[in-house]
Image (cartoon, rainbow, N blue to C red):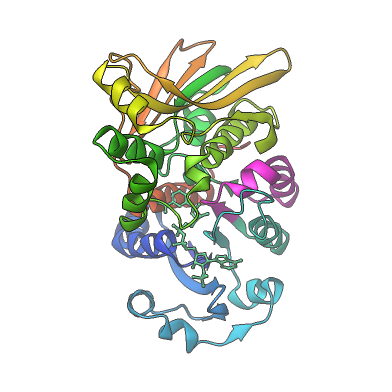
């Protein structure tokens, strides 16, 4: 079956997804009977671009001019209609405080009659139940595997492989930039110097507060709790402390003592609710968390069936994130799984 695909966002992840779709085109067709063409690309700079017969994706990857040469619509509804999109991939920048405009993009796609897949955490934290219910009402799918831990299977793991297993809590390292910052501090840098190094490597944003003050980690905790533990919490419900409060001397002393600092995320069920925290902690040298550094991340789930289950994602790239989106797409159009 052929699908018209529409991308909102054509940055690191959107481009990696375009490359991955090209790379796996043959297997998609031969093993899954899925063919595709990219009929819509939208970004802030490009506007709502349409190619009804499909963009030349190679040309698009080489230069934005290919998109700029295509006609543009003025709003998302007319863009979705013109692209005849069967699947929207929402890959715009995170707005951790409201989830917009990504929530509106996904709503528009579902109303239009398209499936929606996102890598954006904002819609999960601020709109998960609403978007899940809207998708169900429209008979369409809404998936977001890459929103937490890139392409590592977290949401699909519980949806597909562990039905009726109840998560009682989890802990992990969900923000990898703070791994890098803490490691740089262990090697002699101060926090500001470490931030500058992370920015130079493209790991930290211009405004590092999202990582340093634990906002990014808290958003991920809220997303996992809301979906996998089915308790709708927001950013304000996660007690949050970042790494700004510990100085480099303490960080070095902790490493020398064999109990390094990590920005730990924790959630535990308490009655009908969940107690969720993000805070720097010294972890035991033999814990799986002590071994997770660089851009890697880890989560350890407690369930009523499997007492402990740990997933570690080693050195992800935008292609890893794109793979989570591709897997969501394949799962949706192959009809696997229902629910989350
Ligand atoms: N990078 C990763 O590996 C990774 C991992 C997990 C999740 N994510 C999530 O995936 C999403 C994309 O990340 P990225 O690394 O690809 O970001 P990026 O390189 O900064 O690209 C963001 C893209 O979104 C577009 N955009 C931003 N706001 C928009 C709006 N209001 N309307 C339409 N387009 C808009 C930008 O357009 P302009 O350039 O024209 O402004 C750009 O094309 C984010 O939500 C991020 O949190 C990324």
- Residue drawn at x 29%, y 27% as measured from the top left: 252
Chain part drawn in magenta: 116-140
Q: Main secondary structure of the magenta part?
A: helix
x and y percent of residue 28 in the render? 36, 56
Give residue 33's quadrant in the image: bottom left
- Depth order, front residue of 234/339: 234
What is the x, y in percent for residue 265? 50, 27
Q: Position of residue 301 (x, y in %)?
A: 47, 20
**Looking at the image, residue 12 lies above or below residue 43:** above
Magenta stretch: residue 134 in it? yes
Residue 283 on the magenta segment? no
From the viewer's perspective, is residue 39 above or below residue 281?
Answer: below
Image-based side of 301 in relation to 236, left or right? left
Residue for point 64% across, 49% down: 123
Q: As rendered, which of 273 and 27 lies closer to the eye? A: 273
Q: Is residue 202 left or right of residue 225?
A: left
């Amino acid at each position: 079956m052929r699908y018209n695909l529409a991308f909102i966002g054509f940055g690191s992840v959107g481009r990696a997804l375009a490359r991955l779709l090209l790379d796996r085109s043959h297997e998609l067709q031969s093993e899954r009977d899925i063919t595709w063409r990219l009929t819509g690309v939208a970004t802030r700079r490009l506007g709502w671009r349409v190619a009804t017969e499909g963009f030349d994706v190679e040309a698009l990857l080489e230069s934005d001019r290919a998109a700029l040469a295509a006609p543009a619509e003025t709003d998302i509804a007319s863009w979705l209609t013109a692209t005849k999109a069967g699947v929207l991939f929402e890959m715009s920048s995170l707005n951790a405080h409201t989830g917009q405009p990504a929530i509106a993009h996904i709503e528009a796609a579902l109303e239009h009659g398209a499936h929606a897949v996102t890598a954006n955490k904002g819609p999960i934290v601020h709109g998960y139940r609403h978007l899940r219910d809207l998708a169900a009402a429209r008979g369409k799918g809404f998936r977001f595997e890459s929103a937490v831990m890139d392409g590592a299977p977290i949401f699909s793991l519980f949806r597909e492989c562990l039905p009726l297993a109840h998560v009682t809590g989890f802990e992990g390292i969900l923000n990898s930039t703070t791994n890098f910052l803490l490691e740089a501090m262990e090697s002699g840098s101060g926090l500001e110097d470490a931030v500058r190094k992370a920015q130079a490597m493209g790991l930290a944003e211009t405004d590092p507060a999202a990582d340093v003050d634990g906002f990014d980690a808290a958003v991920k905790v809220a997303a996992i709790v809301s979906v996998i533990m089915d308790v709708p919490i927001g950013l304000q419900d996660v007690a949050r402390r970042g790494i700004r409060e510990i100085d480099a001397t303490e960080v070095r002393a902790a490493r020398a003592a064999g109990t390094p600092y990590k920005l730990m995320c924790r959630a535990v069920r308490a009655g009908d609710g969940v107690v969720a925290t993000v805070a720097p902690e010294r972890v035991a040298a033999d814990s799986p968390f002590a071994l997770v550094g660089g851009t890697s991340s880890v989560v350890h789930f407690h369930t009523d069936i499997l007492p402990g289950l740990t997933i570690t994602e080693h050195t992800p790239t935008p292609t890893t994130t794109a793979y989570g989106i591709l897997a969501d797409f394949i799962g949706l159009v192959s009809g696997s799984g229902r629910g989350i």
